[in-house]
Image (cartoon, helix red, strand yellow):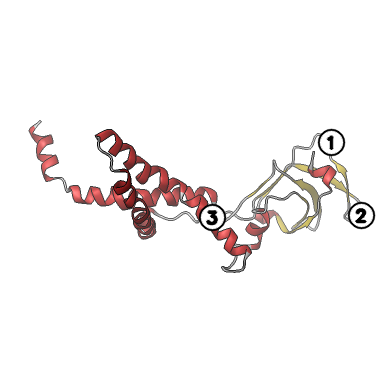
Amino acid sequence: MNGIEEFFKEFDWSRLAIVALFALPGFISLRVWSLIFPTSELPLKDQLGEALSFGVLNAMICAPLFFVIEPKTPLSLYGLAILTLVVLPGLWPFPTLWLMRMLQRLDVILITSRSAWDDVFLRDEPYFVIVHLKDGSRVGGYYGPKSFAGLHPISGHLYLEQLWYMDDNGRFDSAVPDSRGLILRPNDYKYVELMAVPNEVSDV
């Protein structure tokens, strides 16, 4: 027991407080942000500055809650701490993303997408896709709600949920029977063409 008591006596609680108040909320916000917006994977040390910035912003917004609510019991204080240090930092990315997209539509800020590929597939629209393969051939498919397009940092990976027959003029004729789609890597093709989908197809 003496060893444990000595450890707690010598432990620098001020550093733990800094981590709890600033770094932890910041890292939570960054983690949630990476789940809802294409983000490069960076080492933890390279995210520290950004995490602390988010943490300071969170502290500035949440600190007044302690004066307004004035928790009088340890349980209420604990609950408020969980709310301000864990829950709210996990929610901030959602209104932030909404605000960025609104400002983007109003031409106040530049387009936030990392590439034209990301911008197109973030619209969540169905397409008929003509893929021009590197051997000169081409293949047609349907990109719908069950399809997948990899975004930054893995842009170019594509899953088309259904293959379609095309005529000699590149028009889509009919779906390939029993097709379960096609998986493509960036090195498999030269470029892709996107076509509008008739309503009767996109509603299927």
What is the C-alpha distance between the residues marked 2 and 1?
19 Å
- The residue that label 1 is drawn on is 177
- Depicted 115 relative to depicted 94: above or below: below
**Callout in the foreground (2, 3):** 3
Q: Earlier in the sequence, mark 2 or mark 1?
A: 2
Q: Percent x, y for residue 184?
A: 69, 49
Q: Looking at the image, is 74 positioned above or below residue 29?
A: above
- Pointer 3 local density, CA inside 10 Å: few below 14, some 14–19, many at least 20: some
Q: Which residue is mark 3?
A: 97
Kindly state the secondary structure of the residue where label 3 is placed.
helix
**Quadrant in which residue 180 is drawn:** top right
Cβ–Cβ below 8 Å for labels 2 and 1?
Answer: no
Residue found 84% across the figure and 41% down from its top? 175
Does residue 112 appear anywhere in the picture? no
What's the distance in space between the residues labelled 1 and 3, CA to CA? 40 Å
List the residue tagged with mark 2.
168
Residue 74 horizontal side relative to residue 88, left or right: left
Q: Amino acid at mark 1?
A: Pro
